[in-house]
Image: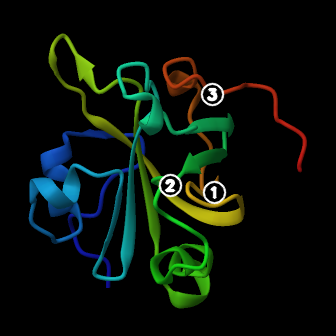
C-alpha cells in the first residue's frame, strides 16, 4: 500500500523534507548526495546548474525532452556494479526511481528546494565512470516549469 506521505508531482520540497516522504529519516551524509538507494527505492536529487561546482563534478544532467532526462552518475560508478545493475533492472526488481530536480543549489543565498518530477523508468545507458543514464518520466514536465528547468520544447529524435 502507498504511504500517505508520498510526494506530489510538480511540488517543491526542501532537501531535509524529502526522506520523510518515503518514511525515512534525514541524515546529511546520505541525503546530500545526488543518488540515494534505500528501502528498495532510488531517489535522484539533481541540481541542473553546475557552474558553481568543481569541474570533475559538473555532471551532464539535463532534460532532453519534456519526458526524458539525462543523468550522469558519480565518477566512481560503473555499469558492472551491483547498485548500478539495480538501476538498469529497477523495473523487474520492483525498485521505483524518483526524480527530484532544481535549477540552482541556492536561491537568494538559501538552499533551493527540489521539484518532484515523479517516477522515471530506465531507457538505456552509456559509458562508465561516470555512466550516462537516459530516463523516461511517467508524466512530462508541465508547461509552467519548462523554461525554469531549461526543458527543450521540441522533441529530440530517438537515438
Say which of marks 1 and 3 sits in front.
Answer: 1
| Residue placed under numbered mark 2 in the picture | 73
- Of labels 1 and 3, earlier in sequence is 1
Q: Position of residue 13 (x, y in %)?
A: 24, 41
Q: Quadrant of residue 36?
A: bottom left
In x, y percent, where is residue 50?
43, 26
Q: Position of residue 76 (x, y in %)?
A: 46, 60
Badge 3 local density, few (<14 within 10 Å), some, or many (20+)? Answer: many
Residue at x 15%, y 57% (from the top left corner): 29
For marks 1 and 3, give the CA distance.
17 Å
Nearer-N-terminus badge (2/3) = 2
- Residue contact between numbered discs 2 and 3, judged by CB atoms under 8 Å: no
The residue positioned 21% from the left and 61% from the top of the image is 21
Q: Nearer the viewer, residue 154 or 69?
A: 69
Marks 2,1: beta carbons within 8 A: yes
Residue at the spot of label 3: 151
Q: Secondary structure at mark 3?
A: loop
Question: Where is residue 32 shown, x and y percent of the image?
Answer: 21, 49
Q: CA distance from mark 2 to mark 3?
A: 20 Å
Read off the residue under disc 1. 133
Work out whether residue 26 or residue 143 is closer to the camera in this orientation and state it: 26
Element type where label 2 sits in the image: loop
Amino acid at each position: 500500500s502507498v504511504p500517505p506521505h508520498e510526494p506530489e508531482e510538480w511540488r517543491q520540497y526542501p532537501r531535509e523534507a524529502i526522506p520523510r516522504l518515503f518514511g525515512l529519516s534525514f541524515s546529511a551524509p546520505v541525503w546530500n548526495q545526488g543518488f540515494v538507494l534505500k528501502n528498495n527505492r532510488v531517489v535522484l536529487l539533481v541540481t541542473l546548474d553546475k557552474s558553481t561546482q568543481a569541474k570533475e563534478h559538473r555532471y551532464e544532467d539535463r532534460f532532453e525532452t519534456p519526458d526524458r532526462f539525462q543523468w550522469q552518475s558519480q565518477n566512481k560508478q560503473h555499469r558492472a556494479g551491483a547498485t548500478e545493475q539495480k538501476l538498469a533492472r529497477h523495473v523487474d526488481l520492483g525498485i521505483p526511481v524518483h526524480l527530484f530536480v532544481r535549477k540552482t543549489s541556492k536561491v537568494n543565498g538559501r538552499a533551493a528546494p527540489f521539484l518532484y518530477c515523479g517516477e522515471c523508468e530506465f531507457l538505456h545507458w552509456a559509458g562508465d565512470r561516470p555512466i550516462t543514464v537516459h530516463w523516461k518520466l511517467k508524466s512530462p514536465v508541465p508547461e509552467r516549469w519548462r523554461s525554469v528547468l531549461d526543458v527543450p520544447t521540441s522533441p529530440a529524435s530517438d537515438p
